[in-house]
Amino acid sequence: MSTTLARWKPSALALASFFILTIPAFAQTPPPSALPDLTPAQMREDLKFLKTEWASQDKSFSDTQRLEFERIVDNTTAAADKLSTKGFALEVMRAVAVARNGHTVARAANMMNALPVKAWWFADGLYIVKVQPELAYLIGARIEKLGSLSADEALAKIAPFISGTDQRIRFLSANLLTSPDVLEHVGATSGQEIPLTLRLADGRTEQVKLNAVSTPDPGDKGKNINRGYTVLVPDDPDLEGRWNHVLDPIKERSPLYTKRTDVTTSWLEDKKVFYIRLDAVSSVDDTPLDQKFAGIFRQSLLPSIPKTIVIDLRLNSGGDFFNTILFSQSLPRLVTPKGRILVLVSRATFSAGISTAAMLKGASQGNVTLIGETMGDSGQFWSEGETIPLPISKIGVEYSNQFEDYENGCTDPATCFWAVVAFGPRNISLTPEEKIDVTFADYAAGRDPVLEKALSLAK
């Protein structure tokens, strides 16, 4: 073991032990996958709890937003006799989303039904990228209208139900836009059969009428409600009941579109560029993430320090803030004197994924560059709360009570999350220096313009 690693590993273990002793353990209740049928009285009981018990825990609402939250809750309470159970759940989502904070969220999206197609927003529109096998001819179609609304009009209609910034809304909206429950609730259709006006891959325009699937996409099993990004990654070929994917014909894919895990590495450009894909700031197995990072340092980076390291955070929706501190603060100091750290980000980069990008930028020796889309939250947000289930519906509603500022910096633990005060960067920008929003044509052809840009900068 190198001297550097010998010093680093005990520090990591000591830091981890300190965190274990000081961080409160919150009981996270997983949300149900289906809603029970609710009576109006039960809806009102949940709404009362939301307004009087849950809301007092959350600090992310401004005074004006809190008044709007209460107005929506009161209106929903008055309308309970006319609401369906799923309509009630959507109104809970709408009320909580008023904070425009991505961590202040009602986790009911996975309780909505879904069409047999899945879509993603590209630079040039909303495209179908995954379908049930019998609808294979719809792959690659651009969605022009959902019911009576254009794709952009439908996005505007459902935006108030999604917590977070515009980029977070764009990320999560594709999943909700293919739900008959949601489309009916916002007035795009008058029933559960959804007319879609499509521009097919061959250029023809066609209207199809689709109903909700009776069984979910088998590729969704085990994935959380923020699974929007996984639509970009084809399922394993041997998955039973597997849906068809636009990338199925592409044999040489970007490393981004391989099976999701926690951290993977590879050498690119004849071993001139070291690529680290970090999909989660938490481990997917029993080996702690900090030990995996130590192994990467010891086995790959320190024996032959590359001039360029690419960190791909584009599918990183978060995890444990503390898993990324030593990794992100040390990496910019370990490249060669004229080396670079190129950090790839997207609208799916969120929470501790953003923390990782921020701390890499904060530790920069003038050698860290962000490439891609604006991330899924701003540099200032509220988080670190707990998910509380509503008493009857069991909808998990997460409150946020700790402020984090990764651009200006946090200096006072009385007003900011103490860990950001201790370890967070100050006076940085999280706006990508190289902004790239991928077109559908590039994606469907197997191209990865964001990684291509990074590799061009590495030359």
Image: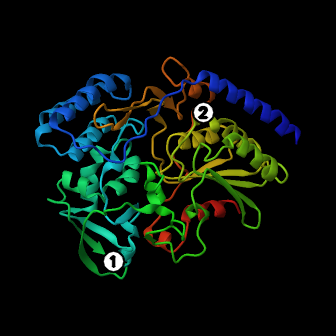
Three-letter code for the amino acid on which mark 1 is drawn: Leu
Three-letter code for the amino acid on which mark 2 is drawn: Pro
Task: Give the residue drawn at x 77%, y 63%.
Answer: 271
Residues packed near mark 1 inside 10 Å, few (<14), some (14 to 19) or many (20 plus): some
Q: Work out whether 51 lies above or below 82.
A: above
- Residue 102 horizontal side relative to residue 259, left or right: left
Task: Look at the image and tell me whether residue 364 can be seen.
Answer: no
Q: Work out whether 276 lies above or below 94.
A: below
- Residue 366 horizontal side relative to residue 201, left or right: right
Task: Tell me which numbered mark, 1 or 2, is placed earlier along the sequence.
Answer: 1
According to the picture, the residue beneath numbered tag 2 turns out to be 425
Percent x, y for residue 242? 46, 69
Disc number lying in front (1 or 2): 1
- Residue 378 horizontal side relative to residue 270, left or right: left
According to the picture, the residue beneath numbered tag 1 turns out to be 200
Front-lying residue, 357 or 211? 211
Task: Give the residue drawn at x 54%, y 19%.
Answer: 413
Percent x, y for residue 249? 52, 78
Q: Work out whether 15 lies above or below 171.
A: above
Front-lying residue, 48 or 202? 48
What is the quadrant of residue 452 in the picture?
bottom right
Q: How many marks?
A: 2
Q: Work out which residue is located at the far top of the displayed protein and give it.
A: 414
Percent x, y for residue 230? 48, 58
Name the element at disc 1: loop
Task: Look at the image and tell me whether residue 448 can be seen.
Answer: yes
Q: Work out whether 90 lies above or below 459.
A: above
Q: CA distance from mark 1 to mark 2?
A: 47 Å
What is the quadrant of residue 102 in the picture?
top left
